[in-house]
Amino acid sequence: MAVTAKPVDLTTDLGFLQLRNPVLTASGTFGYGLEFEPYLDLDKLGGIVVKGLYYKAREGNPPPRLVETPSGLINAIGLQGVGVEAFAAKVLPKLRRLKTAVIVNVCGADDDEYAAVVEFLDKQEGIAAYELNISCPNVKKEGACPALSPRTTFDLVKRIKAASRRPLITKLSPNVTSIVEIAQAAEEAGTDAVALINTLLALAIDLETRRPKLGNVYGGLSGPAIKPIALRMVHQVASRLKVPVIGMGGIMTGADALEFLVAGAAAVEVGTASFVDPDAAVRIVGEIDAWCAAHGIAAVRDVVGTLKTA
Amino acid sequence: MPIERNARLREVQSWGDHFRLIVDAPAIGRDARPGQFVMVKVSEGSSPLLRRPLGIHDADRNGFELFFRVAGQGTEILSRKRPDERLDVIGPLGRGFTVASKGETAALVGGGRGIAPLFFLARALKASGARPVVFYGGRRLADIPLRDRLEKTGFELQCSTDDGSFGFAGFVTALVDKELARVKPAIVYACGPDPMMKALAAITAKHGLAAEFSLESIMGCGIGACWGCVHRIRNENGDGWVKICEEGPVFPGERILWP
């Protein structure tokens, strides 16, 4: 096969944000980014989505917080974290030195807290966009979150979009009857992009004790087990929305990432893979590059939305 | 904390369902300190998905050793590895034990496979001129396979079995309690099941002894990113869920809160 002489163009244009490549790290799987500095060059990533931030530091759920399932991981961390003030004082100054885009995942116990987080972060420099986390299944009873209804999604996205000076990516939950309906509500409310999927609400049982394997009873399933569901949802949403889609769910390799691009995602987030291999996201950038070169593809954007269904 | 993708397994030794693996990995071996751990990828694919955290059993400039008991899918796969196979390992990780000073006596309390990191610690103590006394307990004789190796290495050793098939009959914590007045340790180190360490914490607190315990947990990443391996720890500003992989796995005994 002829190899293209020119290097593959990996740049990714989300409209509101230009990325050096389409690979971001998924919130909740990459800490605050700096934990990974010993293992990879953060500047080689398209972007870093840092762990979800509430206004105040947060306790999280009682252990056990993790359980492995076939090709999957169920977590019920409960968004333990440092809060925005400590993030701005201790973490952001270091992230600001990076060349890669820093996206902050924004959380709230109620709409007012989401607004307060954004209001505080709007005064800080070095943030490229917000990812609105309306879909964490581990903080309220039975996975309740704003992303489960078009109404609550619309209201929250509208409020935060109006309050914020930065682009907004809305992260959606797969635990719904129609992901398209929710995505459309987010688009109508003015979101600049949608990211999907968050984890699937799940349960693991210890048969001998007949107790749940997680302290929180339910948790969120991630990893290769959920990739086919994520691909289907990304395809459904990307086919119907005008705003860009950021796809995620079980991406372990460059081939996995490329499948999401083919399904219609403009960019991807690498999650659980970073637990297994801390340098997975950068490896995946290299694998995307190599695949495109081997297939004579000049620019990775040419792969986006090329699924042949006819 | 290098990622060693191609560490050669030099030797495998086994006692029933207990295994000792000697691994060539100079970069990890040189940096390792007693009480630290490594994250081992046990299979190529996604089953099981996560790496396994294992305490460093011993280390030198050539590499490190692991000692474990087959307890699940991960350790079962690891136990079938043969010499010359390659291992994908991240480490050394976490904060280890504070090695007692010259002339001090240290009690090392290992419950079952919890003996793993204490062998490395005992060697370091000996090298620093301290006097390590090892208490090694299990439910039955088959649970304490390292007794010969510990004795041959020249450590003072006292064993216990819950069923009385070898050494002191009863829990290792009862043996420690009985021997404290005679051994007079300046510090007590421990690694083992939570109930053992909880009981030992009560003993060390009663006698006002310094203590360092190594905690165990399932871990997602081992590098502080997933917040999956927390334990309740007392800090200056109250109690909280603290990451075992990052601030531990070794904690001062008095800071560990038990359910």
Image: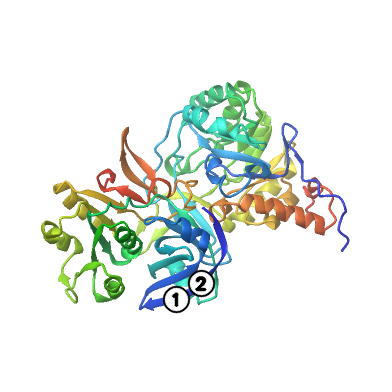
Q: Amino acid at mark 2?
A: Leu
Q: Amino acid at mark 1?
A: Val
What residue sits 71% from the left and 49% below the top?
A235
In percent of width and height, residue B137 lies at: 23, 67
Q: Quadrant of residue A19?
A: top right
Question: Measured along the vertical axis of the image, is residue A128 above or below residue A28?
Answer: above
Q: Disc 2 marks which residue?
A: B9
Question: Could you tell me if the residues under marks 2 and 1 are in contact, i.e. CB atoms within 8 Å?
Answer: yes
* Left-right relation of B256 to A15: left
Q: Report if residue B259 is visible in the image.
A: no
Q: Chain of mark 2?
A: B
What residue sits 50% from the left and 46% below the top?
B225
* Left-right relation of B133 to A112: left
Whether labels 2 and 1 share one chain: yes
Q: Chain of mark 1?
A: B
Q: CA distance from mark 2 to mark 1?
A: 8 Å
